[in-house]
Image (spheres, grey):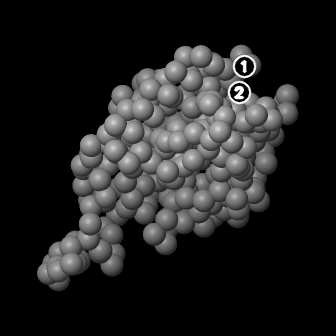
């Protein structure tokens, strides 16, 4: 599989504009902003690029992050640690299946990719990440989610390389389920934006893999506008160890 940990896609998109190459409008570096001033500069550059083109120009290598090697759907669904949503009553049934792929986080198969092809030849990928299954958490900036999918805050990011290769990536969170839906076309150039949102809005509500999990800790935000990684204490009591690293997570 070419694409690694699903949650990293948000980090990728958030940090994509941290530095530029020799081209004034082509962004390639994935390092996150190091300071509040750099973060503000990044946001200013991003806003100007979006206002000018309606999409972000990136290096070809950035788009490889969205390439998935699909295999048999039933095989990957059988080994999951969460129940994926049923697509039978959605427009996805009118698309040709390309198969599926799955990933583990913390030893749990909590990520499922499903690939499709549209009648006009575009490829679609739907990603589900059940954070309740693996106990992970994900922070999203509310100010960076101007769109909506079934009333939930969402973000559409359109990326295009100099070759013309493009990805339009829509993401949102429903309770403890992270969704990503992307198509290999620039929806700012082709009239597919409304169709992509309608496809996302057709998804049913999810059921958590761990319905009785302990609520995750809230994030603390640093000066650069990004969440602060909480360091692991050098000394912990046995009770604190068991709380932070439980051998068995109560789910049922």
Q: Which of 226 and 88 is in front in this view?
A: 226
Name the residue furthest front: 22
The reply to whether residue 63 is visible in this rendering is no
Residue for badge 1: 189
Q: Which of 93 and 19 is in front in this view?
A: 19
How crowded pointer 2 is (Cα within 10 Å; few <14, some 14-19, many 20+) is rated as: many
Q: Which residue is drawn at 44% across and 26% down?
A: 44
Q: Residue at x 66, y 34 (%)?
A: 23
Mark seen at residue 252: none
The location of residue 178, given as percent across then percent down, is: 48, 45
Q: Residue at x 70, y 49 (%)?
A: 61
The location of residue 240, given as percent across then percent down, is: 17, 75
Residue for badge 2: 186
**Quadrant of the rendering where the N terminus is positioned:** bottom right
Q: Which of 234 and 146 is in front in this view?
A: 234
Helix, strand or loop status at disc 2: loop
């Amino acid at each position: 599989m070419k694409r690694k940990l699903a949650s990293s896609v948000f980090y990728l998109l958030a940090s994509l504009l941290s530095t530029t190459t020799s081209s004034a409008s082509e962004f390639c570096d994935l390092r996150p902003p190091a300071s509040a001033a750099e973060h503000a500069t990044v946001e200013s550059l991003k806003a100007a690029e979006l206002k000018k083109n309606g999409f972000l120009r990136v290096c070809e290598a950035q788009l490889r992050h969205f390439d998935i090697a699909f295999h048999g759907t039933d095989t990957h669904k059988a080994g999951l640690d969460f129940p994926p949503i049923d697509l039978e009553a959605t427009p996805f049934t009118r698309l040709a299946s390309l198969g599926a792929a799955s990933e583990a986080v913390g030893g749990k198969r909590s990520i499922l990719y499903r690939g499709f092809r549209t009648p006009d030849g575009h490829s679609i990928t739907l990603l589900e990440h059940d954070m309740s299954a693996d106990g992970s958490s994900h922070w999203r900036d509310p100010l960076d989610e101007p769109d909506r999918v079934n009333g939930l805050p969402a973000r559409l990011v359109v990326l295009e390389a100099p070759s013309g290769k493009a990805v339009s990536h829509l993401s949102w969170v429903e309770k403890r389920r992270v969704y990503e839906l992307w198509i290999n076309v620039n929806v700012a150039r082709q009239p597919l934006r409304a169709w992509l949102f309608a496809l996302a809005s057709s998804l049913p509500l999810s059921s958590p893999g761990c319905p009785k999990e302990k609520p995750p800790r809230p994030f603390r935000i640093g000066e650069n506008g990004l969440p602060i990684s909480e360091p692991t204490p050098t000394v912990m009591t046995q009770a604190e160890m068991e709380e932070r690293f439980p051998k068995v997570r109560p789910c049922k």
